[in-house]
Amino acid sequence: MAETTKAYTWHKIFNSEAEAKEQVPPRKLRQFTLDGRTICFAHTFAGFFGIEDACPHMGHSLSKGNTNYLNEVICPWHSYRYDLTNGKECDYRSRNARVYPVEVREDGVFIGI
Ligand code: FES
């Protein structure tokens, strides 16, 4: 069930932090479609992140890629790398990817759209 606050509509994607960690282990990615947008959910050493799933370069699915120690998601097609905190492509080869906030709350893990 979605909840709307001033800036975002929040979507619960897991019932708890433990469930999120179990279903998406560290360094793994998972695709979600929320409000008609396809989002790549990432679990890294720095926490949970949300970023648009379609690579800004040529649209391949970032959730089919990998993450690295720099907290970036790496596109599986041409290996462009996007910072998960701000969506910046590391070598300025494309526009930035849109990022979505992730919140861990007592009642679950949420993504803001
Ligand atoms: S489509 Fe992602 S790097 Fe080219």
Image (spheres, rainbow, N blue to C red):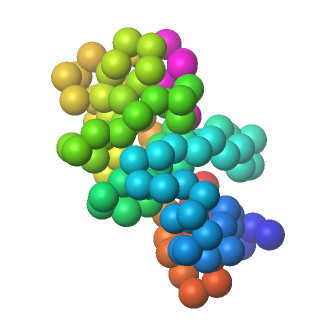
Q: Position of residue 76 (x, y in %)?
A: 44, 20
**What residue do we see at 36% from left, 54% from top?**
44
**What residue do we see at 30% from left, 60% from top?**
46
Report the predominant secondary structure element of the magenta stretch: loop
The number of numbered badges drawn on the structure is 0
Q: Position of residue 63 (x, y in %)?
A: 53, 35
**What residue do we see at 57% from left, 63% from top?**
22
Q: Position of residue 39 (x, y in %)?
A: 59, 42
Ligand 1 image-quadrant field: top left
The picture quadrant where one finds residue 53 is top right
Residue segment shown in magenta: 53-60
Q: Is residue 44 magenta?
A: no
Q: Does residue 15 show up?
A: yes
Q: Position of residue 9 (x, y in %)?
A: 65, 64
**What residue do we see at 38% from left, 12% from top?**
78
- Name the residue nearer the viewer: 80 or 37: 80
Q: Check the image and name the residue furthest to the right.
A: 1
Q: Check the image and name the residue furthest to the bottom.
A: 106
On screen, residue 40 above or below 111: above
On screen, residue 24 above or below 108: above
On screen, residue 28 above or below 60: below
The picture quadrant where one finds residue 74 is top left
Decide if residue 110 is on the left or right side of residue 26: right
Q: Is residue 58 magenta?
A: yes
